[in-house]
Amino acid sequence: MTEQQAAPAHDELNDPLPDLERAVKDRPDDAKALVALANHYWLIGAGPEVVGDLASRAIASDPDNRAGWHLWALAESNPRERVARWQQVSTRFPSDDLAKANLADNAASLAGAEHDYEAVDLAIETYEDLLTRAEHTSQRSALEKAIATLRGWKF
């Protein structure tokens, strides 16, 4: 085996974190740089506080940056507050099905944890909205099953 074959590829040795941090330092109001760093921090488990701060800065810099809004919602650790954030994202971006799916999933989780019928209703309503646009049989089936399950919940 040659030395070149034994050594990892150059890209495998480079951690993107220093470059991402430098980009944010050099361009503190660049929403794309802020989102890239926040996403990397999220993936390496840096914690919701730092991610939420960067996401908030990205939103302030570019209010139309959906990725910033998604990270902002994800970074909220309180389940009820996280549902409220996903509601804000879904309202701001009405065609964002990923935000709606997160809203429905988080509302269902909150409903189960806190025996909250309003959260059950929100989850059902949101899943039903997604069902109106579901194009694939597997999507429709999963949404119908989730709706039926939630309608059967009794606390």
Image (cartoon, rainbow, N blue to C red):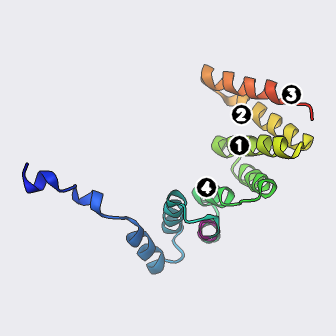
The residue furthest bottom is: 26
- For the residues bearing labels 2 and 4, Cβ distance under 8 angstroms: no
Q: Secondary structure at mark 2?
A: helix
Dot 3 corresponds to which residue?
151
Q: Which residues are magenta?
A: 50-55
- Real-space Cα separation, disc 2 to disc 4, in angstroms: 18 Å
* Near-viewer residue (42 or 1): 1
* Residues packed near mark 3 inside 10 Å, few (<14), some (14 to 19) or many (20 plus): few
Magenta segment main secondary structure: helix
The residue at the far left in this view is: 2
Q: Check disc 2 and give the amino acid type.
A: Leu
User: Could you say which disc has been placed on residue 130 in the image?
Assistant: 2
Q: Which residue is rendered at x = 84% and y = 42% of the image?
A: 111
Contact between labelled residues 1 and 4, with CB atoms less than 8 Å apart: no
Q: Nearer the viewer, residue 30 or 15?
A: 15
Residues 126 and 8: in front is 8
Cα–Cα span, label 1 and label 3: 18 Å
Q: Residue at position x 48%, y 74% from top? A: 24
Tell me if mark 1 has few (under 14), some (14-19) or many (20+) residues whose alpha carbon lies within 10 angstroms of its own: many
Q: Which mark is residue 100?
A: 1
The nearer-to-camera label among 4 and 1 is 1
Q: Is residue 110 magenta?
A: no
Task: Count residues near mark 2 (Cα–Cα under 10 Å), then give few for <14, some for 14-19, many for 20+.
Answer: many
Say which quarter of the image contains residue 8. bottom left
Q: Which mark is residue 66?
A: 4
SS for dot 4? helix
